[in-house]
Each structure stands twice: as structure tokens, then as C-alpha cells.
Amino acid sequence: MRWSFTKAISLTLLGMLAVVAIAAGPGVAPKLPFEGKDSIPGSLFKIDVMCILRSWRIKGFMVCMHGIKPHVCLRVENAYPSGLIEVVRQPFKSHFLEVGGFLKGLDPLRFFGGSSSHVPVAGDGTTNQYVEARVYTFVPPVPLLEATDIPIVKPWGPFFRVDYISELDGWGWRNPVVDAFTAPESRIASLKSCDRMPDLMSCAGTWGSYYPRIGFVNHPSQVIAAFLQALRAGRAASRPVGRVVLSPYPFEPRTGHYIQMLEPVHRPSVPIGSPLVKAIETGAGSKYGAYLFMHYGIFETCKGCLPVLLTGPRVPW
């Protein structure tokens, strides 16, 4: 009953966003090829079902007491879609048709200017990557799996919800002071290299550090930088102290969980921090610096004994 009510609210919100986009009229037709190219319901058809199936495993059995009666359950885990994250260079632009008009209406609320630019760094062969980011909770049904007897772990959450829009968080998304005071681990992360010591807590493998969460990363690959920026945005939205967040994103991106590129090219999901960097970035660059990702948290449960829990980080193989 709770899920049905939440689903109804989510679909109502989608409908309202679509109405806003349509009401904007023909005078605001997409100016860039990626704007309005995707839809939230259309993301259902891009889910990497094989990611869910190949990550499914039995972790053991558990016995708990229901009153005076023992209950035995099967403890299982698997990845499951939990969020959509946009990384773009153009403020208030979106891949989603339903969101474009809504974002345009927020333009007057932007503070501290834009951070979306792209300039080379003299002499070091790398590139400064500046982006804006949006984080949406996205916990969809997967009918193909629901029709089977496999005990798939599905987290509780809305089908769709807007959580974070970096343009409204101009100070936090552009200034390291916020992380310095609200995320002490960011200071520790700044003292080490993820290339040489990619620990599970502060590093997305060798892709780079989860900090600072300021809309900027110095990275030689635009593609891997986009992956990293999406993860940083997801973490900023999931731990929003000192930030402007519409709703906390409940599924913190963690090393060894999964992320899937949906735009500019549709790819299968990969473990967060995977060392197969060349295979991930080849042929996946965007002319406009616009990327769309689906995040898959790894969840576990033991029905009747444990609630659905987001598992900890793990080695990204």
C-alpha cells in the first residue's frame, strides 16, 4: 500500500513537470541536441537488467525470533537502480523532456553565477572540468524480474524525485569551504593520491577522489571526469549538511557499486572505480559536455529479519 501511494505521488510529479515543459511553449524549443532527448519513463527501457542478475548472490541464512517463534530467512544481495544523475556544462539544461521547463523556471533563483566552463591548464597536459549536476531518486519497477521467483532486493523509494540541482547550491558546489567544515574526510582525501592509494572510502578506484564536491575536477579524460562528477554530486546530495538540497538522496554512491552511462551513448553498467578505464571512456565523449548516468546501489536483506540495507563499499572488480 505504501509503495502504491508513493508511486502515485511520483507519477503525479512527473505529470506536473511535463505540463510545465509543455506550457513553456514552442518558443523554447531545444537549442542543443541533448536537451529534451530523454524522458523519465523512457529510462525504464535503459535499465541494465543483467547488472541486477549478475550481482545477485546468496550471503547465507539468518534466524531471528518473531515473538517466541524462530524465523529462518535467506540473506541475499543485488544491485538495483536507485538514481539518475545529470552532469552538464550548460546551466539549467536537461536531457529530460519533463525537467527542462521546470529547470528554466528556476533560473532567477541562481546565485553566485555559473560554473560551467572548460579551460586548459597550461603545461600539465590536463583539463579543468567544470559542470553543473542534478541528482534524482529513481527506484523503478522491473517487471521482467518481478514476474520471476528470484528474491530480488528492491529498496524502498519513490519512482522519481528531484533531490539536488547544483545551480541552486552555487556556494556549496563551487567553494571548498563547505566540505572543509562539513566533511572532515575531505581534508584527509586531499593528502593522498587515488592513483597510488585508491582506498575504498575516499576514492572511486583510480578514477579519483569523492572530494572536493565543488563542481570542478582536474582530469585528462572528460568522460571519466563526468563519471567522477556524477558520483560527487550523488554524495553531496546524500550528505547535504551546509548545502541547498531539495531532498536528501538516500543512496550514497559507493566504490564497487554500479553506474551506467545513458547519454551520450548507452552502455552497460560498470563497477564504480573499475580499473578498465580505456574501455569505459573510448567512444563515449560528448561534444557538449553533457552526460546522463543511472546509479545502482547494492542492497541486501533477509526477509522477515533484516530491512533492506545499502551495503558498504567493495573492491571494484
Image: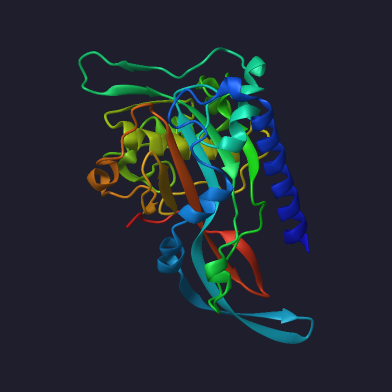
Q: What residue lies at 72% left-to-right and 38% top-to-bottom?
A: 16
x, y percent for residue 202: 43, 41
What colour scheme has been applied to the protein in the rendered image? rainbow
Which residue is at the front of the view, 226 or 254?
226
x, y percent for residue 46: 46, 53
Does residue 297 appear to the left or right of 98 in the view shown? left
Residue 244 visible, this orientation? no
Which residue is at the front of the view, 10 or 238?
10
Q: Residue 238 lies in what quarter of the image?
A: top right
Q: What residue lies at 41% left-to-right and 64% top-to-bottom?
A: 50
Residue 211 visible, this orientation? yes
Which residue is at the front of the view, 169 or 140?
140
Please say if 221 is above or below 274.
above
x, y percent for residue 169: 60, 24
Please say if 292 is above or below 259.
above
Q: What residue lies at 32% left-to-right and 31% top-to-bottom?
A: 222
Report the residue that reaches farthest toward the bottom.
69
Does residue 208 appear to the left or right of 16 in the view shown? left
